[in-house]
Image (tube, rainbow, N blue to C red):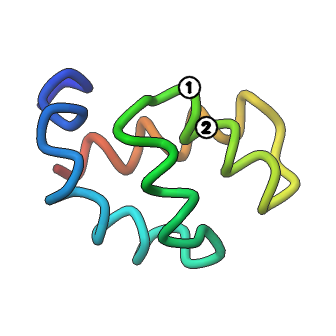
Amino acid sequence: MNWDQIEGKWKQFKGEAQVQWGKLTDDELDEVAGNREKLEGKIQERYGKTKEEARDEVDAWMSRH
């Protein structure tokens, strides 16, 4: 699955993202609205990760779906 598909079906994937990154609030995930860069930024903020670490986590999450 590619990111365009995830973005198009964000409402379905939002719950799975909440499970993966439990520190992200519903409001933050609504704000992300399927935008990969915003998701990576929120992960960086909440978890204190580097841009590379956040990107790797999103890549791993995406590969499972």
- Res 62 → quadrant: top left
Residue 5 or residue 63, whichever sits in front: 5
Q: Do the residues labelled 1 and 2 touch (CB within 8 Å)?
A: yes
- As helix, strand or loop, the secondary structure at mark 2 comes to helix
- Res 46 → quadrant: bottom right
Q: Identify the residue at horizontal 18%, vertical 24% (top origin).
A: 2
Q: Identify the residue at horizontal 48%, vertical 42% (top origin).
A: 32
Amino acid marked by disc 2: Glu
Q: Where is residue 12 in the image (x, y as percent from the top left)?
A: 14, 59
Q: In this view, does 44 lie above or below 24?
A: above
- How many circles with numbers are drawn on the protein? 2
Which dot marks residue 37?
A: 1
Is residue 39 toward the left or the right of residue 48 in the image?
left
**Could you classify mark 2 by the number of other residues whose Cα lies within 10 Å: few (under 14), some (14-19), or many (20 or more)?**
many
Q: Position of residue 17 (x, y in %)?
A: 39, 62
**Could you classify mark 1 by the number of other residues whose Cα lies within 10 Å: few (under 14), some (14-19), or many (20 or more)?**
some
Which dot marks residue 40?
A: 2
Is residue 12 toward the left or the right of residue 34 in the image?
left
Amino acid marked by disc 1: Glu
Q: Identify the residue at horizontal 43%, vertical 71% (top origin).
A: 18
- Res 39 → quadrant: top right
Q: Position of residue 41 (x, y in %)?
A: 69, 37
